[in-house]
Image: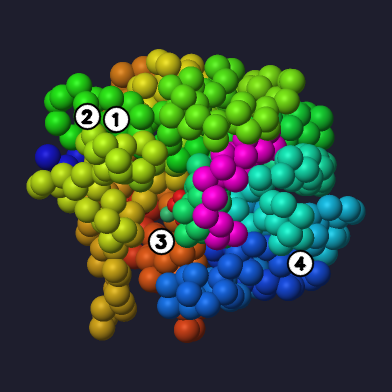
Amino acid sequence: MTPTPASLFARFPARFTWGVATSSYQIEGAPAGDGKGPSIWDTFSHTPGRVSGGDTGDTACDHYHRWEGDLDLIRSLGVNAYRFSVAWPRVQPTGRGPANAAGLAFYDRLVDGLLARGLTPWVTLYHWDLPQALEDAGGWPSRDTAHAFADYAAIVAGALGDRVRHFITVNEPWVAAHLGYAEGIHAPGHRDHGASIRAAHHLLLGHGLAVGAVRAHAPGAQVGITLNLAAAYPSRDTPEDHAAARRQDGFANRWYLDPVFGRGYPADVCELLGRLSPEAQGVVRAGDLETIAAPTDFLGVNMYSRAVVRDAPGRGWLDLEQVRVEGSEYTGFGWEVAPQSLTDLMLRLEHDYEPGALYVTENGATYPDTVDADGQVRDPERTRYFQSHLAALADAISGGAKVSGYFAWSLMDNFEWAEGYDKRFGLVHVDFATQARTLKASGRWYRDFLTRAAVGTPG
Ligand code: FCB
């Protein structure tokens, strides 16, 4: 039985952060505006064959120019928080050196605009738009990038930290490292497994250094990392599939969780990596693991689906394959709708890692939405997705997980990386030809869910 919005809402703490999320490259456009330098996503999307349909983020949602209207839209949803990212190459066009005042000023206006509307800003420092000049100098596989990131974090924390109380260092290091450097399907498009392991180490090191930079330049602000996590399950109840699920969990989840929470890299995965492990590649220097384990205030979790795997000797270095589950529902991305796995995941994180607080920093679904003749966007699957995942989150809270907030992905349809504009995740539909924004039925549902019970103070 579907709960009413009010009864579902009542299952959450009174002090709770309710938000929507976006990221810079996906919405801003203005790739050279006010002195911005190119990022790896500018380069990648302009390389023929890399992004579906040849789409680029050149205009995206034109948020760089339409931000005021977009903030009004956010406010109209009844959320109390907004998660966005700062584009590093707007702040430092080549990734190093003094701040570009005009670029930084954009985020200054944005933060003031949010506060004026009673919205709490959540700033992600790195959501994948690495300055191209840093990639040319070696990118994340190079240690220098982690130090450059810390300098950049200090600039942003210094400029915004008087008003911003929540910073996320890095968004989804697994995606940045693995899809960007091993699989080549995200920028910068390399296919080098060893380099991806080095990239992952330096993303984590950059996170740890950035925690220090935020603490120093924005005293009292909360800081954490956001990981993409998907609970892993065996396809069959066999020892082999259980072992495969553990390998999947090690590769995608524990590889990041363990070092961030002070346990170093998981030994079982290091063993599988052999000469490609961070130690064997010689990238772990004395003190790195301590830096990576810098105490944080929260763990951000981006959750979309789960992984169901079976043992498949010879299939890649993990000897496993993902299985499509008979009878399950799948989103437009081919991701299984698996709300129960959100409950399992949050309880496991609470139990195994005891983070200061847990926030769902992204959760959502893509479906091929269209605007009907009457101007409405009817997306009942997305509404069901949000309902079921919020119910699952409420179950996790009842079970003891200390969850302090939830951000829906995404405020509006945007540039979905390698998929271009094809995959729509918004609560708000965007017509990319006219930039018209239309609240989808799911957006109305979220608004009603939040406003019927009146949003309390952010947690
Ligand atoms: C996450 C990303 C976000 C968006 C969603 C669908 O991996 O953090 O930018 O692309 O997936």
Question: Which residue is at a point 67% across and 73% down the rendered structure image?
Answer: 30
- Judging by the rendered image, the residue that carries numbered circle 4 is 36
Residue 203 image offset from top left, x and y in percent: 63, 40
> For this rendering, which residue is in front, 452 or 423?
423
Where does label 1 land, which residue?
245
Whole-angstrom CA distance, mark 3 to mark 4, is 26 Å
User: How crowded is the residue under tag 3: few (<14 C-alpha within 10 Å), some, or many (20+)?
Assistant: many
Identify which amino acid the numbered label 2 is placed on. Asp
Regarding mark 2 in the picture, which secondary structure is present there?
helix
Q: How is the image coloured?
A: rainbow
Marks 1, 3: nearer the viewer = 1
Q: Is mark 1 within 8 Å of ligand 1?
A: no
- Report the magenta residues as a range: 188-207
Q: CA distance from mark 2 to mark 4?
A: 48 Å
The amino acid type, in three-letter code, at marker 1 is Ala
Tell us which disc is closer to us: 3 or 2.
2
- Is residue 108 found left or right of 51 in the rendered image? right
Q: Secondary structure at mark 1?
A: helix
Was residue 200 drawn as part of the magenta stretch in this picture? yes
The answer to the question of whether label 1 and label 2 lie on touching residues, with beta carbons closer than 8 A, is: yes
